[in-house]
Image (spheres, grey):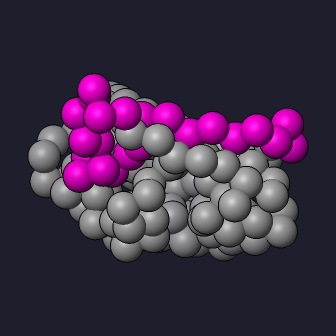
Amino acid sequence: MSHTITNPAELHDPVGFGYSHVVDAPSPDLVFIAGQYGSDPSGSVASADFADQVERSFANLGTALAAAGLGFQDVVRLGTYIVDHDHAKLDALLTVIARIWGDKPPAQTLIGVAALALPDMRFEVDAVAARP
């Protein structure tokens, strides 16, 4: 594995919140993935449903990672952006993160925002991955 995840005992357990406190990626070979949203191949938002947008955003992230010869296991940091953030939306996000990373999620910062680039966008995710 190209990185090590640490959640110090002196800090709260962040896994249930969908992130880890520290990801040590000793490799200088980093790959930055731009914000991915719930778009179809034409760039249009594929669904107005928030949970659908989260699912599709992470599917698109997986496609972008694969184009660089990487996978979800190589992600060391996520940036997530939620329009009109609330607990129900957080639950939808955590469901996807738990399915992909289980008890070893990457470091993550979630930012509640007023709007994203397109009027129908409700969620976006960007990532940094470390090449093994």
Q: Nearer the viewer, residue 48 or 20?
A: 20
Taking the view exactly as shown, the residue that stands out farthest to the left is 87
Q: Which stretch appears magenta?
A: 8-29
Q: Nearer the viewer, residue 7 or 85?
A: 7
**Which corner quadrant of the image does residue 8 belong to?**
top left
Res 38 visible: no
In percent of width and height, residue 114 lies at 32, 28
- Residue at image point 34% right, 41% down: 82
In percent of width and height, residue 109 lies at 43, 33
- Residue at image point 29% right, 34% down: 9
Q: Is residue 84 above or below residue 36?
A: above
From the image, give the main secondary structure of the stretch colored magenta.
loop
Number of marks present in the image shown: 0
In percent of width and height, residue 96 lies at 36, 67
- Residue at image point 59% right, 47% down: 4
In percent of width and height, residue 66 lies at 75, 71
Q: Nearer the viewer, residue 14 or 119?
A: 14
Q: Is residue 84 above or below residue 2?
A: above
- Residue at image point 23% right, 33% down: 12
Quadrant assignment for the C terminus:
bottom right
Q: Is residue 37 above or below residue 5?
A: below
Residue 20 lies in magenta, yes or no?
yes
